[in-house]
Amino acid sequence: MRAALVRTCGAPPVPGERAVPVPAGGEILVRVTAASITPLDVLCAGGTSYFGTPATPYVPGVQGVGVRDDGTAVWFPTGAGMRPGDGSLAEYAAVRAAETVELPDGVDHRLIAALGLSAVAAQLALTWRGELRAGERVLVLGAGGVVGQAGVQLARLAGASTVIAAARSDAGRQRAERAGAAVVVPLEESDDVAGLTARLRAAADGPLDLVLDPLFGIPAAAALRTLRPGGRLVNLGSAAAETAPLDSATLRAGSLRILGYTNNELTPAQRSEALTLVAAHAAAGRLTVDYDTVRLNDISTAWHRTDQRIVVVP
Ligand SMILES: NC(=O)c1ccc[n+]([C@@H]2O[C@H](COP(=O)([O-])OP(=O)(O)OC[C@H]3O[C@@H](n4cnc5c(N)ncnc54)[C@H](OP(=O)(O)O)[C@@H]3O)[C@@H](O)[C@H]2O)c1
């Protein structure tokens, strides 16, 4: 079969030939219809992730969408790059049957591939870790990314009364607006905490209850200062910076809560339930994200694209 192959960690995968995988106990063979390239795939294939350096060659792709041999469409996770074994960026994948999630009839496979675990993270960071309640006011940072675009829409679907957003690029700000943010605040490379805090407060027009934060760094430090006493910030990524200039006075004066989130902590049931909700919203036209589609043969040039989510079709 055709497959993307990571031959050297740190270099983009190349298209090549791989034997069709033989399912082990508890696994089934899925014919892949769409699989995305996510920051986690690039991190793992770089060889420097906290999962260690994967043995090469391997097929990357930590998630995908495909069809079982009975014709049912499913979303599936893989451990590619995190544990031994191949992933989704190939014509076929052997996946754990119990971890597959059946998809609604007629749903767009590419859209589900684009949303996938990024949307699961947005949903559960908001509602499970962040305890979002109906009527609350939410700020979504990095709202032009997939977590952010999904976060804006899912916060509204979960009953948030107001969702404001912040994003860096022009394209990201436009995506945040299309996702339904009431106001989109620009993030600048030259921002300091005080200046960004002032802009966020002006846009929020009142204290906020919850921040969804895939960025950390200065945006997270400024966002904390927009929270009401007892407000929460859920961090699920460090796209802007690994550290943030947090100050004790802001934290203690507001009795604020800073919470970490990772999909890796989810039980299969939690992940499956969240993905089912995401797929239902997508099938009903309530949830979407921008993405571009490329063929498997173009995997090498697509690998490091960051302008939007890339969905690969075998
Ligand atoms: N914890 C988890 O379980 C989990 C799950 C999924 C994702 N994540 C993490 O969450 C983060 C976002 O994921 P994603 O899927 O949304 O990725 P994505 O679609 O690639 O989006 C990345 C976003 O980060 C923004 N960004 C990058 N550098 C920035 C900077 N210096 N300042 C401000 N914004 C910056 C980009 O803004 P522009 O578009 O404006 O350039 C883009 O919107 C990643 O770090 C990812 O690893 C974590």
Image: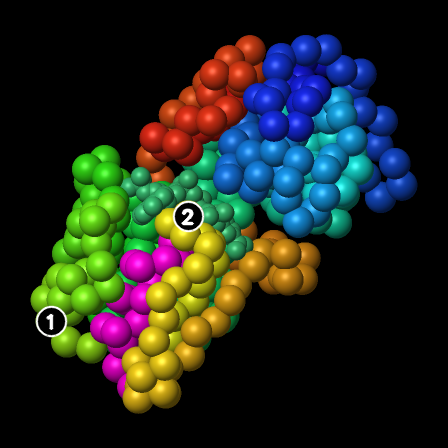
Q: Which mark, residue 44?
A: none
Between 22 and 252, the residue placed more toward the observer is 252
Q: Is residue 42 magenta?
A: no
Residue beneath the point at 10% across and 66% down: 202
Answer with left or right where residue 281 lies relative to residue 189.
Answer: right
Badge 2 vs badge 1, beta-carbon distance below 8 Å: no
The percent coordinates of residue 109 (x first, y second) are: 50, 32
Quadrant containing the C terminus in the rendered view: top right
Residue beneath the point at 31% across and 71% down: 224
Between 178 and 283, the residue placed more toward the observer is 178
Neighbour tally class for label 2: few under 14, some 14-19, many 20 plus, Cα within 10 Å: some
Neighbour tally class for label 1: few under 14, some 14-19, many 20 plus, Cα within 10 Å: few
- Amino acid type, residue under disc 1 in the picture: Asp
Residue 112 is at least partly visible in this image: no
Answer with left or right where residue 196 lies relative to residue 23.
Answer: left
Asked if the residue at label 2 sits under 8 Å from ligand 1, the reply is yes
Q: Is residue 108 above or below residue 4?
A: below
Q: Is residue 265 above or below residue 228?
A: above
Q: Which residue is mark 1?
A: 205
The percent coordinates of residue 191 (x first, y second) are: 21, 54
Between 237 and 27, the residue placed more toward the observer is 237
Looking at the image, tell me whether mark 2 or mark 1 is earlier in sequence order: 1
Magenta highlight range:
212-231
Residue 249 is at least partly visible in this image: yes
Q: Which residue is mark 2?
A: 239
- State how far apart marks 2 and 1 are (Cα): 26 Å
Disc number lying in front (2 or 1): 2
Residue beneath the point at 72% across and 43% down: 52
